[in-house]
Image (tube, rainbow, N blue to C red):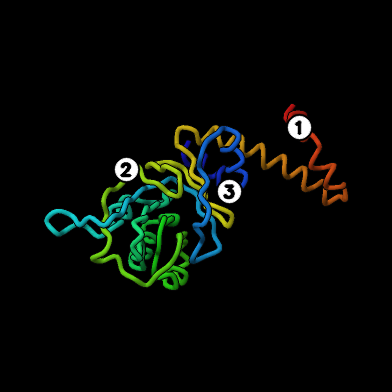
């Protein structure tokens, strides 16, 4: 089921998914987090990491995000909350190499990332709020892994679905993903009909006002 939903989600864009979420009254869209390294969209299920400024007790801990990378595989997207306000990267070059080796689809950082050129050279997709050269070492630390985080104004949990492209990042609650995707597919089909109509020369005002929902119902009969 998970692989099927990811495949179906990959066939659409974030706008259709956002519209579907809107129709259900669900929050999910986050703007201002952009692809820093490639032109690729990423789709998958979230592994979450929360970063903060509190050092670990005892002074030693695994490097931030290493647990998520070690757990992750194809179909996973690592999602990081680094909203401390400290100018320090929540993601870097060695992590990009390790994540790519494990087959992870990409990374989304609510905050800065670094080693952007290195990740771009790898063809590894990093979405981030911003970029910096400043290391996290001694500045931010991993607080938790696969617990609820906040990206933009959206709460994100482990195994939630995510699509990120040039328009936005959208998170789908795992328990509502199939419902959202089904509605989004209908939206995609409706917009396809509308696009075909304007490309035939029909007035855009008439096309935008037409009831394409009925056409979709007729096509499904």
Q: Which numbered mark, 1 or 3, is in the foreground of this view?
A: 3
Q: Residue at x 56, y 36 (%)?
A: 180
Image coordinates for residue 80, horizontal then vertical, percent: 37, 53
Residue position marked by numbered label 1 in the rendering: 219
- Badge 2 crowding class, 10 Å Cα cut-off, few under 14, some 14 to 19, many 20 or more, is few
> Would you say 109 lies left or right of 136 here?
right
What separation in Å lies between label 1 and label 3 (alpha carbons)?
Answer: 25 Å
What percent of the width, then of the height, locates residue 60? 15, 59
Q: Residue at x 76, y 32 (%)?
A: 219
Tell me the SS state at disc 1. Answer: helix
Question: In this view of the protein, which residue sits in the foreground, 221 or 202?
Answer: 202
Calculate the distance from the C-alpha at mark 2 to the C-alpha at mark 1. Answer: 43 Å
Q: Is residue 15 left or right of residue 220?
A: left
Q: Secondary structure at mark 3?
A: helix
**Residue drawn at (77%, 44%) of the image:** 194
Q: Is residue 45 above or below residue 70?
A: above
Give whichever of 35, 44 is nearer the camera.
35
Residue 98: quarter of image: bottom left
Q: For residue 58, which quarter of the picture?
A: bottom left
Question: Of label 1 and label 3, which has the lower sequence position?
Answer: 3
Q: Which residue is mark 3?
A: 14
Residue under circle 2? 147
């Amino acid at each position: 089921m998970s692989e099927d939903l990811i495949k179906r989600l990959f066939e659409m864009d974030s706008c259709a998914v956002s519209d579907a979420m809107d129709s259900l009254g669900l929050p999910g869209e986050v703007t201002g987090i952009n692809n820093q390294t490639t032109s690729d969209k990423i789709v998958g299920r979230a592994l979450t990491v929360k970063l903060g400024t509190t050092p670990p007790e005892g002074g030693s801990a695994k490097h931030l995000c290493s647990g998520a990378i070690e757990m992750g595989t194809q179909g996973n997207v690592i999602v990081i909350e680094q909203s401390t306000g400290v100018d320090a990267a929540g993601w870097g070059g060695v992590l990009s190499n390790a994540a790519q080796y494990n087959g992870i689809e990409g990374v989304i950082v609510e905050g800065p990332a670094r080693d952007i050129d290195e990740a771009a050279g790898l063809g590894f997709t990093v979405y981030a709020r911003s970029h910096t050269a400043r290391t996290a070492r001694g500045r931010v630390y991993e607080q938790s892994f696969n617990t609820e985080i906040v990206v933009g104004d959206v709460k994100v949990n482990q195994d939630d679905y995510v699509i990120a492209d040039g328009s936005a990042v959208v998170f789908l609650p795992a328990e509502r993903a199939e419902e959202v995707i089904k509605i989004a597919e209908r939206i995609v089909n409706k917009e396809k009909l509308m696009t075909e109509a304007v490309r035939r020369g029909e007035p855009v005002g008439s096309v935008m006002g037409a009831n394409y929902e009925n056409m979709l119902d007729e096509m499904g009969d």
